[in-house]
Amino acid sequence: MYICTKVLPKLDLLSAQTTGIDLELLQCLAEIAPFISPNTEGKDLGSCQDAVFSQLLNYVPKPPEDIQTDLTSESSSELPSTQFSHVECLLFIFHQLCKLNPNYFDSKEDLLKDLKLRLQYLARGLLF
């Protein structure tokens, strides 16, 4: 939990100091995420999920306002730079945390909708 709440918010600062450390940290966190105790307090788990989710939104590109014209135009072949290893680690970590707290999106339906749109845009960009 300490890594999620204290280190993840400062991941940009760490990567600026040492290249590649952000991915190593995310990979290590992904390796230990399945072993997080279900006895963790709800407040700690919620703040950990918030930190992971905000980092996930930083790495998954936001779709443009007019997605249909953007995908059919010639400039759509250039998808925003995405670090897929980072996204994969963060999705896995978030999935493991949601197993312990499946009600995370109950009061945050707009965040879930935003994440779905971003992931669909990312998938469409990969298919074209």
Image (tube, rainbow, N blue to C red):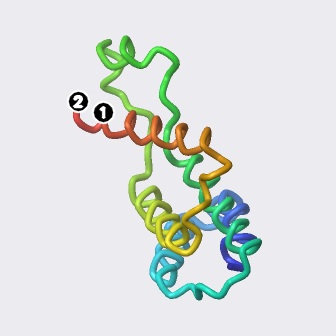
Image location (x, y in percent) of residue 3: 67, 76
Mark toward the viewer: 2 or 1 = 1
Identify the image quadrant of residue 111: top right
Left or right: 26 as drawn, with respect to 77 = right
Left or right: 54 as drawn, with respect to 62 = right
Q: Nearer the viewer, residue 73 or 36?
A: 36
The quadrant of the picture occupied by the C terminus is top left
Question: Residue sitting at 28 percent across and 38 percent down?
Answer: 126
Q: Residue furthest left?
A: 127
Q: Nearer the viewer, residue 97 or 118?
A: 97
Identify the image quadrant of residue 39: bottom right
State whether residue 19 is above or below residue 57: below
State whether residue 49 is above or below residue 120: below
Amino acid at circle 1 = Arg
Question: Residue sitting at 70 percent across and 66 percent down?
Answer: 46
Image location (x, y in percent) of residue 93: 50, 69
Q: List the residue tagged with mark 1.
A: 124
Q: List the residue tagged with mark 2.
A: 128
Determine whether label 2 and label 1 are within 8 Å by CB: yes
State whether residue 3 is above or below residue 86: below
Question: Residue sitting at 44 percent across and 67 percent down?
Answer: 92
Q: Residues within 10 Å of mark 1 (few under 14, many from 20)?
A: few
Image location (x, y in percent) of residue 76: 34, 21
Amino acid at circle 2 = Phe
Q: Nearer the viewer, residue 57 or 78?
A: 57
**Helix, strand or loop status at disc 2:** loop
Alpha-carbon distance for marks 2 and 1?
6 Å
Q: Residues within 10 Å of mark 2 (few under 14, many from 20)?
A: few
Number of the label disc, if any, that sits on residue 7:
none
Question: Residue sitting at 45 percent across and 81 percent down?
Answer: 31
